[in-house]
Image: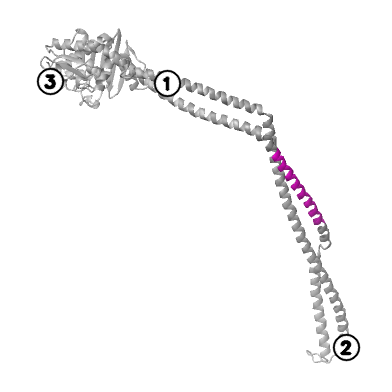
Amino acid sequence: MITFQKIKWKNFLSTGDHFSEIDFTKNGTNLIVGTNGTGKSTVLDALTFSLFNKPFRKINKSQLINATNEKDCLVEVEFNINGKEYLVRRSIKPNLFEIEVNGQKMHKQADDRAMQKILEENILKVNYKSFTQIVILGSSAFVPFMQLSGSNRREVIEDLLDIRIFSAMNSIIKDKIRKQKEEIQVLDLKKDNVKDKLQMQEKFIEELDNRGKENIKGKKVKINALIEETDKYVITNEELQSEVNDLTKEQEKVTGSSKKLRSLNNLKGKLSQKVATITKEHKFFSENVTCPTCTQNIEESFRLNRINDAQTKAKELQTGYQELEKAIKNEEEREHLFTKLTKEITKLNNDISQNNTRISGHNRQIRDLESEIQKLTDQLANRNSEHEKLAEFNNNLQSIFKELADKKTEIIYHDFAYSLLKDDGVKTKIIKKYLPFINQQVNRYLQKMDFYINFRLNEEFSETIESPIHENFSYSSFSEGEKMRIDLALLFTWREVARVKTVSYTHLTLPTKRIV
């Protein structure tokens, strides 16, 4: 049971920088009266603001701050619940939200929303909507129970009967079902993956058993063929190398012919020059008896000696020139032979190099095949380990099947619990038990207000109203005054139910502007 003890505020709405305070402990029941504008509604706004961070009336939060001071808006409310003393302090500019329990500040949560949740769910055990339906009845901002939608009516009743816990439980179970379905999806993927591995391992073992030896045999045949071909290339290279050696020896014999040929051609040039000089001299002395330059007679004996000497030298040079021509021709033949041998040796070396490349490739293939044969041999030797892997995959698959079955069983149980905790489940059964009491109390209060009608709420919280005059009436069929009597009867009934449930009963009666 909630017992409000004291409320005070400052810089709240039209209130200035001095605390306004109301002490509810002086009397068992408090009635606040006054003319319009004296602050009766401010009490409601201050109370709901301190407890729920929003006013009772439709006022923006920023408008709660005193327009003159524009800061230090503060509201404090003190109340008692089951022997525990509580103080809630809330302010704007600066923003502040504190809860004290028996004089000790409650540990600050991560944020104000978490603190608000604790206040509503653990301390007050009522939210704003239900608080405004059960605890306080205002005027302009008050929405009567009968004017609420069916879902909002249910929400008020569930808060009143303290059965919203079933909705929370339902939400938790729903979340569990969702997570379990996600886990099942993961397990299904895992199962498919293990099944694939199992099938691959079975095929691998089959391949290993049925084709392993054939593969080894086939690879050995390839190796033998490669070795045979490699040997042929080796023999061919030996023969080619022998040819290269022979040609190299021949080449050595004609090595240097180019240099010698150059020397001979140089000598030929010099010899040709000498022949031209002697020929010129012989012609001069043969054709001239006087000197063309000085016009003196050339001595005949001198002239003849020079002619004979030129003839002798010309013959000697002619003989040497012919011998030189033969030597040049011989060296040209030697040089041609050297070039020919060089080409043949180069071709043979290229053939040897190509064969060596083929031999290297074959040797590499042979090594790869031998490695594959060794791998296959090891696998054949270790077939037991492959069967162990197969057994491991099978065990994993069976374990996943079992886990899937367990998860699906859990979902069945949770689905059953979920169906029980839905609106048409346990909550409806509890509401059914209280509906006769609720209807009885409403009619009792209506009779006290001299309003003799038979008012009934059904499981969907729709009303059936019978009067002496009309059998089937609805809430909207009545006048505003008659509606107010029904609203009051419902409010007093909610308090009766709350008192029975020890959820949210209060001694506080707050004002209305209309009295019926």
**Viewer-side label of 1, 3:** 1
Q: Give the percent coordinates (x, y) of residue 426.
A: 32, 15
Q: Which mark is residue 304?
A: 2
Name the residue carrying label 3: 480
Prevailing secondary structure class for the magenta stretch in the rendered image: helix
> Which numbered disc, 1 or 3, marks the residue that appears first in the sequence?
1
Name the residue carrying label 1: 411
* Mark 1 vs 2: CB contact within 8 A: no
Q: Amino acid at mark 3?
A: Glu
Give left or right: position of 135 versus 326.
left
Q: Secondary structure at mark 1?
A: helix
User: Residue 459 versus residue 30: which sits nearer the camera?
Assistant: 459
| Residue name at image x 10 percent, y 16 percent | 469
Q: Give the percent coordinates (x, y) of residue 312.
A: 88, 82
Instruction: Residue 511: tell me if it is visible.
Output: no
Q: Amino acid at mark 2?
A: Leu
Q: Amino acid at mark 1?
A: Ile
Q: CA distance from mark 1 to mark 2?
A: 144 Å
Chain part drawn in magenta: 217-245
Is residue 441 positioned above or below 321 on the image?
above
Q: Quadrant of residue 338?
A: bottom right
Q: Secondary structure at mark 3?
A: helix
Q: Give the percent coordinates (x, y) of residue 303.
A: 86, 88
Residue 465 covered by magenta stretch: no
